[in-house]
């Protein structure tokens, strides 16, 4: 049960819930400005969703799992994975930032680096360790060519 609760979408959902609550219950009269924050927020949410979809499609094409606790069958380095080793987590962070901007949740900006830190500690470090052990020099070359986030 814990394996199904401790997944990145749950952490993203929790951060989004806190940001929404902060924007509606405790706005403190602060905002990012008129239209530009809505536009940028919408673009970030859309781009984040697109990055995530591209990553999932590439993982499915390579017949490997998208679950962070799952056993991978292939090291995916093609497509969007040529730009980021963690495009799904990057998409999550973009979506969080987009909603924070869209909702004018100024104080919730702190949630973006907190979310990134949580994802790195709870998921990325363990995933990279498993990939390093399974794919050895292939993963080492990939990690030297491709950055963790961007």
Image (cartoon, rainbow, N blue to C red):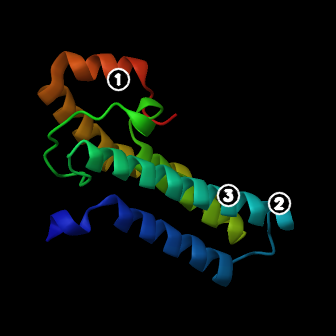
Quadrant position of the N terminus in the picture: bottom left
CB under 8 Å between discs 3 and 1: no
Please determine whether, in this image, residue 33 is positioned above or below residue 138: below
Q: Residue furthest right?
A: 34
Neighbours of disc 3 within 10 Å: few (<14), some (14-19), many (20+): some
Residue under the point 58% across and 79% down: 21
Q: Residues within 10 Å of mark 1 (few under 14, many from 20)?
A: some
* Disc sitting over residue 36 in the figure: 2
| N-terminal-most mark, 3 or 2 | 2
Residue ID for mark 3? 43
Q: Position of residue 19 (x, y in %)?
A: 58, 70
- Residue designated by label 1: 143
Report how far apart the C-alphas of labels 1 and 2 lie in the structure. 36 Å
Of the image marks 1 and 2, the number of the one nearer the N terminus: 2
Question: For the residues carrying marks 3 and 1, which lies nearer the camera in this image?
Answer: 3
> Is 31 on the left-hand or right-hand side of 133?
right
Seen from the viewer's position, the closer of residues 53 and 103 is 53
């Amino acid at each position: 049960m814990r394996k199904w609760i401790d997944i990145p979408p749950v952490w993203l959902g929790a951060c989004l819930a806190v940001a929404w609550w902060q924007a509606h219950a405790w706005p403190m009269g602060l905002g990012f400005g008129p239209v530009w924050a809505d536009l940028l927020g919408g673009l970030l949410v859309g781009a984040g969703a697109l990055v995530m979809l591209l990553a999932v499609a590439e993982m499915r094409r390579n017949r490997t799992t998208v679950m962070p606790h799952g056993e991978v069958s292939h090291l995916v380095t093609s497509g969007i994975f040529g730009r980021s080793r963690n495009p799904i987590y990057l998409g999550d962070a973009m979506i969080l930032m987009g909603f924070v901007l869209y909702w004018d949740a100024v104080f919730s900006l702190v949630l973006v680096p907190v979310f990134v830190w949580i994802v790195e500690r709870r998921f990325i470090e363990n995933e990279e360790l498993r990939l390093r052990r399974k794919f050895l020099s292939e993963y080492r070359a990939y990690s030297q060519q491709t950055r963790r986030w961007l």
